[in-house]
Amino acid sequence: MKHRIEGPTPLTIKATATGAEIGLASFLKLVFLELFEDADGDPSSFAEEFADMHSLSQAAQRGGVDCHARHEFDERLDQMIDRYADEGTVKVPSCGVTQLAAVVREIAAPRPVPGQRGAA
């Protein structure tokens, strides 16, 4: 069962065999809309910025964790997350927090495992 958590950016959560899945499609749609708006304002600059980030990511992978490219990539990626994705946060109002807590308690509760009935 998929539970919907209400808020300015709704999310979903559902139990899986190994834990839970949190659906962030609404949040990601907003991120894409921010990207589209930025691209519409200056398409060539936008494309250059993303191509440059791709080059930096490749250089960072080749150079390891302490290379200049890695530090520059991380810093610029953090700036992009701040700009396009509201610092990477999903705001959940108090009523949504209450819903989320109830769903997490339900998902975390012990569940019967098929095949264990009558195994004792």
Image (cartoon, rainbow, N blue to C red):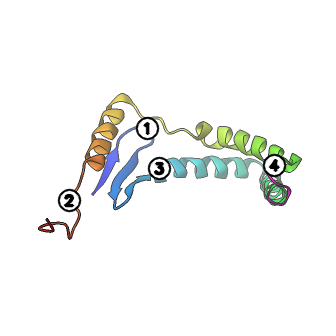
Please tell me which residue lies in front, 34 or 54. Answer: 54
Q: Which residues, given as a range, are shown in magenta?
A: 61-65
Q: Secondary structure at mark 3?
A: helix
Q: Quadrant of the C terminus?
A: bottom left
Q: Residues within 10 Å of mark 2 (few under 14, many from 20)?
A: few
Tell me how far mark 1 sits from mark 2, CA to CA. Answer: 35 Å
* Tag in front: 1 or 2: 2
The image's mark for residue 8 is: 1
**Residue 113 in the image: x percent, y percent?**
23, 63
Crowding near the residue tagged with mark 1, few <14, some 14–19, many ≥20 C-alpha atoms within 10 Å: few
Which quadrant, please, contains the N terminus? bottom left
Indicate which label's residue lies in the foreground, 4 or 1: 4
Q: Nearer the viewer, mark 2 or mark 4?
A: 2
**Residue furthest toward the right?**
68
Residue bearing the label numbered 4: 70
65 sits left or right of 38 in the view: right
Place of residue 116 in the rendered image (x, y in percent of width and height, measured from the top left):
19, 66
**Residue 94 colored magenta?**
no
What's the distance in space between the residues labelled 2 and 4, CA to CA? 46 Å
Disc 4 to disc 1, how far (Cα)? 34 Å
The label on residue 112 is: 2
- C-alpha distance separating marks 3 and 1: 9 Å
Amino acid found under the numbered disc labelled 1: Pro
